[in-house]
Amino acid sequence: MADTAIGVEGAHKKYGERAALDGLDLRVARGTVHGVLGPNGAGKTTLVRILSTLLRPDGGRIEVAGRDVVTDAREVRRRIGLLGQHAALDEELSGRQNLEMFGRLHHLGARHARVRAGELLERFGLTDTGRTAVRAYSGGMRRRLDLAASLITEPEVLFLDEPTTGLDPRGRAEVWASVRSLVGGGTTVLLTTQYLEEADQLADRISVVDHGRVVADGTADELKTLTGGDRIDVVLRDAGQLGAAVALLPLPAADISVDADRRLLSAPVVDRMAALAGVVRALEASGIEAADVALRRPTLDEVFLHLTACDDRTDRTKEAV
Amino acid sequence: MSTYVLSDCWTMTRRELAHWARQPVQVLVLLVFPVMLLLMFGYLIGGGRGVEGSYVDFLVPGMLALTMAFGLEGTMLAVTQDLNKGVIDRFRAMPMANGAVLVGRCAADMLQSAVGLAVLISVGHAIGWRTHGTPGAFLGAVGLLLLFRFAMLWIGIHLAMVAGKPEMVQAVQILVWPVGFLSNAFATPGSMPSWLGTAVEWNPMSQTATAVRDLFGGPGGEPGHVGAAVLWPLALVAVFFPLAVRRFARLSR
């Protein structure tokens, strides 16, 4: 298992009666980016906090960089970096003071810590912040400094818990670029996100988590195949006709999802050509005008909804109809 | 591994000192507040029921002890604020010594208290307070005061972790006042109703104040209280230090 950076078997964690992790399994290969995708409350943050030794699991075998997170926490801490959801910085101190302090606490020695702080400030474009306290930083600057602080020792494993939540598109692009450059250096990255696009962009493999378990695991393409292959999209000219179209098209009504804002009907198909021909004929015969009809691969959004579908989501889809 | 314990604690102490350097006004307020209380009681409210001899000589050692007791609030506030900041997660996910965060707080607060004592002693001298003991006894008195502060510090750290939220600190801040004043800082127990006097004499802070007055050679001092002024704080530390450290370790639950 020398090529395994993160190994989780049957992780359990309860908060009172509620199980945050309910027998979660995960294996992340060294040097890869692994996306953990799930809705709010799925257990993503609990998983990251356990992997980074901040939280004790109730049960399960959990290893990071070959060390047990419970019995060998200190050794794990020497090998990891953590970028949590909230900035883990001393707001009263400057960026340089923060980085030097973290460097010393990583036992780099005073001189090395100073040099390293300078390198990281330069790399993340924070050199000219001088003595300004972190509390006066913008959100993007704070995130960059936080990421820099996670990289003090060039960690073997880096945890990013929703790294771009709350950032504008530019800040998001910056964080993505940093993550990509890290992986080039051999760091293993575990990234949690609610954004499918982010997982699709960055991750080699993705685990979809819901209710404290992994409900699907694979590359983005494999996950897309899971929902049953191709789909047909029909965009109508008039949103008022969506209901009529659902009833009339030769597609199983239960599988059709409707997006009223985009005047869009979408459904999985088995025989591509037959479905396309059937839809076009039905539209012509009924006189419902279509702006576009197209066959396509499913998006990760659909995979996600499909895999984590719970009652309230199904309800919402019906209401939209 | 253990070779890093001291350097980790020093790093965390430096962090607190860096905070001071950035907020000199806040530090100044902390130093001025006890001076204000001293002047208020010395000139406005003064009188000193049951005190034989100079009231200033009675009041200043009492104020020194009270200032040490009130330090509990400052410690508690700082710890709750720290625990509610994201940075604590980074510390806890680092290979640093367990509890260096608490030790840093401890060192900084003790240093602040030592400076506070120096300021208060100087102001006391300026308003006419005189000690009559030996220099050795003087240093012993300062040592007892700092020992008492050390006990208050660990109570403060423990309460902070029990309370969790900075809002809860307010409740404790309000409670510290009656406990502080339910002592012989301003008046002798003999001048109070007997049940109150008994409660006041049992207050660990009163033990420290009486012992310190004795060592300074002023009114209100009685020989034989130094033992209690050493044992009380040590007993409090023996209870609250392990409780606090255990609480800190259990943040991961």
Image: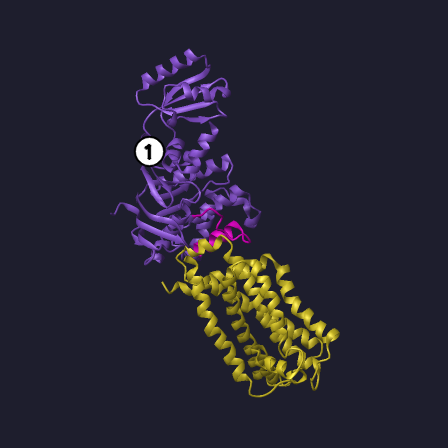
Chain colours: A purple, B yellow
Give whichever of B129, B169 is nearer the camera: B169
Residues in magenta, as a range: A83-104
Give whichever of A251, A307 is nearer the camera: A251
Specify few, some or many for label 1: CA neighbours under 10 Å numbering under 14, 14-19, or 20 or more. many
Amino acid bearing label 1: Leu
The quadrant in which the N terminus of chain B is found is bottom left
Q: Position of residue B90 (x, y in %)?
A: 45, 53
Residue B209 falls left or right of residue A302 = right
Above-or-below relation of A147 to A71: above
Give whichever of B125, A307 is nearer the camera: A307
Query: Which residue position is annotated with label 1?
Result: A223
Above-or-below relation of A173 to B38: above
Give whichever of A169, B17 is nearer the camera: A169
Q: Is residue A19 visible?
A: yes
Q: Is residue B117 visible?
A: no
Residue farthest along the right direction in this orientation: B44
Q: Position of residue A156 (x, y in %)?
A: 34, 48
Taking the spot 56% from the left edge, 49% from the top edge, the residue there is A135
Say whether residue B93 is magenta: no
Q: Position of residue A120 (x, y in %)?
A: 45, 46
Above-or-below relation of B51 to A183: below
Q: Chain of mark 1?
A: A
Q: Position of residue B72 (x, y in %)?
A: 56, 68
The quadrant in which the C terminus of chain B is found is bottom left
